[in-house]
Image: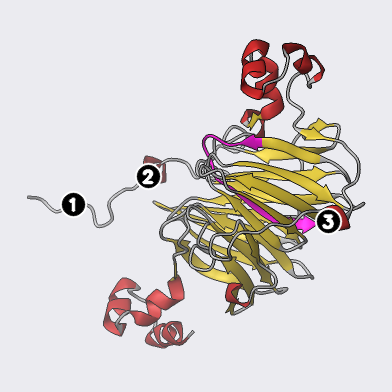
Amino acid sequence: MPPGAKVAYHDPQDVGAMPDFRFSLDGNRPKVTSGGWAKEATVHQFPISKGIAGVHMFLEPGASRELHWHAIAAEWAYVIDGRCQTVVLDPSGASEINNYEPGDLWYFPKGHGHSIQTIGDKPCHFILSFDNGAFSEHGTFSITDWIDVTPKDMLALDFGLPKDAFDVFPKGEAYIQAGPVLQPADALDAPWPKDSTHKFRLLKDPRAVREFEGGTFRLATVDEWPIQKTMSGGVMTIRPGQMRKLHWNVNANEWHYYLRGKGQVALFGSGGRGKVAEFKPGDVAYIPMGFGHAIKNIGDEDLEIVQTWDNGKFEEIDLDTWIKSSPRYLLSNNFSGVPGETLTKLKRA
């Protein structure tokens, strides 16, 4: 056969255009009710985000996110400010009541009934992450909505009440309902055994600490928190001018909510594709599984990022670790034309 071209032509578009991976969650239109609001980033607003959806929710003092469940996703949460309480019911009929403060996490498996109540006279807000990009706060299964659309004779038979007792129930979904302030002294607390509880103290549990060059990382996986089988998550802090080095996630998609500071993410999508974007507080990023990326702090204060993955096991590989573990002769061939002293520095970096 005749020889081919020395360098075969390759069109990066053969593997698809590089998608946008930044979205302003806090710039999105909120869903507002009497007791608070919620802003969401799903695959419908943020097309790349197929595996994970996110919500920023704010509850006024006395407000509660009503009893509800999610048919298609588990829920992971990080409390930013204020105090709140959750009540969760599992299929066995067992219920758990937990109280939260800033830096705490909760996790509810898909389909488990739950609610959220503000504690004290200060608002509470938190970041929610779901292991399905199609999940929407507009599609939760809320009990006020259910009771409103169910025939009253069925409700009467179920609860042993006269039909007209349901005339005064809310019309439609309450969602986040205003109410009297729940004082801390009156907030019940009935946690389950530690190995199965829905609560994890991310900022206080020493098992969560993972240091890296340039910053700190607090992470909860299924190994530290057994109930969290389908997700991992935590908070990464990167010092000014430093970065989380080039790496990729082996088994999960990655989602960011930028809490503080100014960051830059460089994303590598194979086939000659790369894209760089800058992030500020309120923005979210989505890194598809297997895409190479790095995160740099380009501001003058610490960069803080809430991060989640749609797998209970956390697995990643750093590029510099791979290079250091490769034989020198392989690197010399791989990086043809690069001076030997540069390769030496690469392996020592």
Residue at 52% over, 61% down: 293
Q: Amino acid type of disc 1?
A: Gly
Image spot of residue 281 (x, y percent)? 76, 54
Q: How far apart are the alpha carbons under marks 3 and 2?
A: 51 Å
Q: Is residue 311 visible?
A: yes
Residue at 42% over, 40% down: 16
Secondary structure at badge 2 equals loop
Q: How far apart are the alpha carbons under marks 2 and 1?
A: 17 Å
Given residues 287 and 11, the one toward you in this image is 287
Part of the protein shown in magenta: 68-81
Magenta stretch holds residue 219: no
The residue singled out by tag 1 in the image is 4
Q: Amino acid type of disc 2?
A: Asp
Crowding near the residue tagged with mark 1, few <14, some 14–19, many ≥20 C-alpha atoms within 10 Å: few
Given residues 6 and 257, the one toward you in this image is 257
Q: Is residue 314 left or right of residue 138?
A: left
Mark 3 against mark 2, which lies toward the viewer? 3
Crowding near the residue tagged with mark 3, few <14, some 14–19, many ≥20 C-alpha atoms within 10 Å: many
Q: Earlier in the sequence, mark 1 or mark 3?
A: 1
Magenta stretch holds residue 79: yes
Q: Amino acid type of disc 3?
A: Gly
Within the image, what quadrant is residue 56 found in? top right
Query: Which label number is shown at residue 11?
Result: 2
Image spot of residue 286 (x, y percent)? 57, 50
The residue singled out by tag 3 in the image is 82
